[in-house]
Image: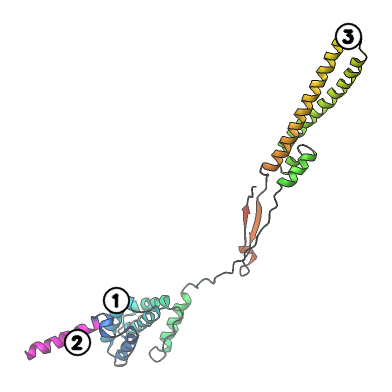
Amino acid sequence: MQLVTIGSITLLLWAWPLLPANAQSNAADRAKEIQRALQRADYQFASALADSAIANFKQFSPTQLAEIHALRALVALEQNQSAIVEAHFLMALQLAPELQLDPIFFSPAVQARFEQLRAQLPKAETPQRVETRYVIVPDPRIKAAGKSLLLPGWGQRAKGHRTRGLLFTSAAATFAAATLTTHFLRASAEDNYRKANSQNVAQRYDTFNRYHLLRNNFALGLGLIWSANALEALLSPAHTAPVSIGIISPNLPAAHAFLLAVAVKF
């Protein structure tokens, strides 16, 4: 019976370093236990404690785990395991970039090597302040519609639609000229009709009536073209060139600025 008890106690002592962290001590005490083992020069026990904690990393905060990795690197250094010293130091720095080594346990040479590794790590990017600036692009359609009301095709040309503007201007000019021409011909035919006698009154009335209808039809066509031209200028999108917006960070040199081309359509 006594032999079984002694054997159980011996087995427990051998297995105790490999038990989960919460079965031995809480997370805050683990680093102190490793430090006490280092002070006793019990490197095998310190190594087992550190490895057990690393295996159960979920029970530790990043800062606590970083301290344990640093102590594990020190144990490896004392055991001449130089191959894993830097690996544990790097893990410690990745977990806690601002970690400082305790000068009681780490010699100046070890601290210098630790700082060299810290300097080799990529620097964390400083968050850049982003400024929101609004670019107000006026809608050219209202002014274009007003211009087209004054002169057909003017608003289209103002929006960059030169061909469309030329077509409206040509069509309006043609119908305006035709309206004026037929109006003068109608006036002349009306005078002749008023001076007609019984022999030519029917012929002169037909001439007057023909020019009268032509003038009215051309005037109606001119009105339709004028209205369509103003409506098209108001509703159709403008031919807008891309707007170049420069984005410059106050912390970056001008060489790193870049332009963003934005095409705005209405």
Binning the other alpha carbons within 10 Å of mark 3 as few (below 14), some (14 to 19) or many (20 upward) gives few
Report which quarter residue 5 is drawn in: bottom left
Q: Position of residue 170 (x, y in %)?
A: 77, 31
The residue carrying mark 1 is 55
Is tag 2's residue or tag 3's residue first in the polypeptide sequence? 2
Mark 1–mark 3 distance (CA, rounded to whole Å): 121 Å
Q: Position of residue 130 (x, y in %)?
A: 59, 66
Mark 2–mark 3 distance (CA, rounded to whole Å): 140 Å
Could you tell me which residue is drawn at 35 percent across and 82 percent down? 68
Is tag 1's residue or tag 2's residue first in the polypeptide sequence? 2
> Where does the N terminus fall, quadrant-wise?
bottom left
Q: Position of residue 94 (x, y in %)?
A: 42, 75
Mark 1–mark 2 distance (CA, rounded to whole Å): 19 Å
Binning the other alpha carbons within 10 Å of mark 1 as few (below 14), some (14 to 19) or many (20 upward) gives few
In front: label 2 or label 3: 3
Query: For residue 13, which numbered disc appears in the image?
Result: 2
Residue 1 appears in the picture as rendered = yes
Report which quarter residue 60 is drawn in: bottom left
Find out whether the residues at labels 2 and 3 contact each other: C-beta distance under 8 Å: no
Query: Magenta region's main secondary structure?
Result: helix
In the structure shown, which secondary structural element does the residue marked by tag 2 occupy?
Answer: helix
| Magenta residues (range) | 1-17
Query: For residue 26, which numbered disc appears in the image?
Result: none
Query: For residue 200, which numbered disc appears in the image?
Result: 3
Find out whether the residues at labels 1 and 3 contact each other: C-beta distance under 8 Å: no
Q: Position of residue 236 (x, y in %)?
A: 67, 41
Nearest to the observer: residue 155 or residue 38: 155
Left or right: residue 93 compared with residue 164: left
Residue at the right extreme of this rendering? 195
